Image (spheres, rainbow, N blue to C red):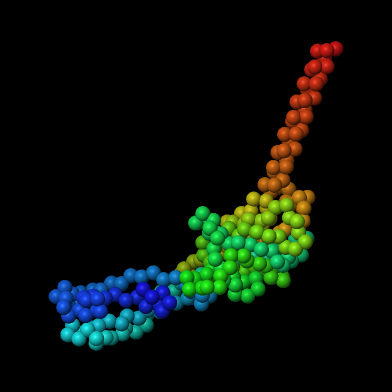
Amino acid sequence: MDAASGVLTVKFGTADGDIIPAKDLFKVGAAVVITYQAKLNANAVAGEANKNSATVEYSHNPNDWTNHKTTPPSTTTTTYTGKVSFHKTDVQGNALSGAQFQLLDAKNNNSVIRMVKISDGKYRPATDSDTQTVDTLETDNQGNLTLDGINGQYVLKETQAPAGFDSPVLASVGFTVNVDQTTGAATVSGITEANKLAEAVTNDGDAVHVINARNLTEMPKTGAAWLIIWIAAAVIVLAAGIMLVVADRKRRVNA
């Protein structure tokens, strides 16, 4: 298989494809079934039908293996892919440019996915033939980050907050892109973020809102970070209460 040209060669007979020495092994009229798998390349477009065109070039004369015919192109296989957009803001809703992320493969031990930059704030997964790849994704001037050509379970991990933000906690957003291979419809679901720093945008089916807090007081009070603080505070209060009870008992004993 030559991945660059998309040519799969199957040779019968000798190494150069001469079937004549072994023609008794290949009966006239016998079926030849070739099954293959292919990946979408850099030309795939999210939301559109990406058609796979295949032709078969074959030798058909057992007395002359160089005599070939070619079938008409077949485009019966259609593949769809999806996309997701993120919008990065502060807690007041102001767009934040320059936030940096990595895209992780949730199905493969959260390994980092290599990407290709299409334009500012827009990226796609790298193919085997791509040489200019990145693993750091950055929001554009409007705070937008679009990931094109994806389908599956992922984690978008923030690695650096925008300039001017000393965020106590950075977002780590789990999400799933589901693409219906019959209709091409793509949905984004399963959005999770332990500190409540991300949520779906209700008026846009493929968008996710991600926020940066400037300090701990701006963090959502129902998130994991504040839960730890509440638990720690409760433990301190409980310990203080126990100490007061013990002190009071000692005072009564000594009275």
- Furthest toward the left, the residue is 24
Query: As drawn, is 92 to the left or to the right of 173?
Result: right
Residue 50's place in the image compared with 170, above or below, is below
> Above or below — where is 208 with respect to 251?
below
Picture quarter with the N terminus: bottom left
Query: Which residue does the image show at 77% across and 21% down from the upper left?
Result: 246
Task: Residue 51 in the image: state x and y as whole percent.
Answer: 45, 77
**Going by the image, does 106 lie left or right of 58?**
right
- Total tally of numbered discs in the picture: 0
Measured along the vertical axis of the image, is residue 171 above or below residue 224?
A: below
| Picture residue at 47% right of the left edge, 76% below the top | 50
For image coordinates 51% across by 77% down, the residue present is 43
Residue 14 in view of the camera = yes
Q: Is residue 240 left or right of residue 157?
A: right
Image quarter of residue 118 = bottom right
Residue 205 in sight here: no
Q: Position of residue 107 (x, y in %)?
A: 50, 56
- Residue 83: give x, y in percent of width and height: 57, 68
For the C terminus, give its image quadrant: top right
Give the x, y percent position of residue 19.
20, 79
Q: Is residue 51 left or right of residue 102?
A: left
Residue depicted at x 41% and y 74%: 3
